[in-house]
Amino acid sequence: MNIAPKNAPYSLYYYDKAALQKLSKTDLETRYKEIEKLPDSEKDFAYNVASLVNNLTYYSEDDIQKAIFLVFKGDATSILSLEFEDAKGNRITSVSSSVSNNVHTYFFNDPIDPDIKLLLNIESIKAVKNVPFVLAGLDLP
């Protein structure tokens, strides 16, 4: 399911265990033949999802219960970071994460609560930007 904000220049898809297992029921050869039939603009995304599905075998059942799998499609350069909160608004920090192409995987200590919230920190023209700088070798009055 696409969970990106409306009118964003990208799509962000969340894949849970059930969605990944459903996709994994198609055999590898058939999956890649179907991808080759897609328009070029869709192939990269489809290959990224196929890679995620293929790598599912490397995760234990416990790992999958404690992981969030996200796949970006389109221009996501405006996203500065991703953060997670529980239902009470407390930040949840992942114990590890990995990014491969446009596939982002976040691992947590505990199983994922269905009420978890994803926060996207997005660059905006209206945003205040802190730009660190140093004035070196400049005599000031």
Image (cartoon, rainbow, N blue to C red):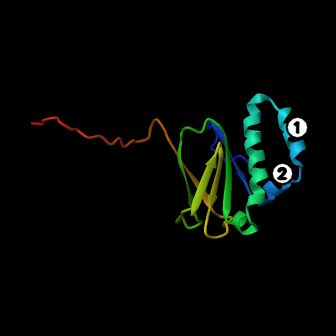
Q: Which mark is residue 130?
A: none
Q: Secondary structure at mark 2?
A: helix
Residue drawn at (77%, 35%) of the image: 43
In the current view of this chain or complex, which residue is farthest to the top? 40
* Badge 2: residue crowd in 10 Å (few <14, some 14–19, many ≥20): some
Residue drawn at (73%, 62%) of the image: 59
In the current view of this chain or complex, which residue is farthest to the left? 141
Q: Horizontal and vertical percent for residue 140?
A: 12, 36
Residue flagged by tag 2: what amino acid is it?
Answer: Leu
Describe residue 32's horizontal placement relative to residue 97 as left or right. Answer: right
Residue flagged by tag 1: what amino acid is it?
Answer: Lys
* Badge 1: residue crowd in 10 Å (few <14, some 14–19, many ≥20): few
Q: Quadrant of the C terminus?
A: top left
Q: Where does label 2 land, which residue?
A: 23
Q: Horizontal and vertical percent for residue 81?
A: 53, 49
Q: Which mark is residue 33?
A: 1
Describe residue 134's horizontal placement relative to residue 82 as left or right. Answer: left
Q: Is residue 108 above or below residue 71?
A: below
Q: Is residue 128 above or below residue 94?
A: above
Q: Is residue 14 above or below residue 136?
A: below
Residue drawn at (35%, 41%) of the image: 131
Q: Quadrant of residue 18?
A: bottom right
Q: Horizontal and vertical percent for residue 123?
A: 49, 40
Q: Horizontal and vertical percent for residue 80?
A: 51, 45
As rendered, which of 108 and 88 lies closer to the eye? 108
Q: Secondary structure at mark 1?
A: helix
Q: Label 1 vs label 2: CA separation?
A: 14 Å
Q: Please report whichever mark, 1 or 2, sits nearer to the chain's N-terminal start.
A: 2
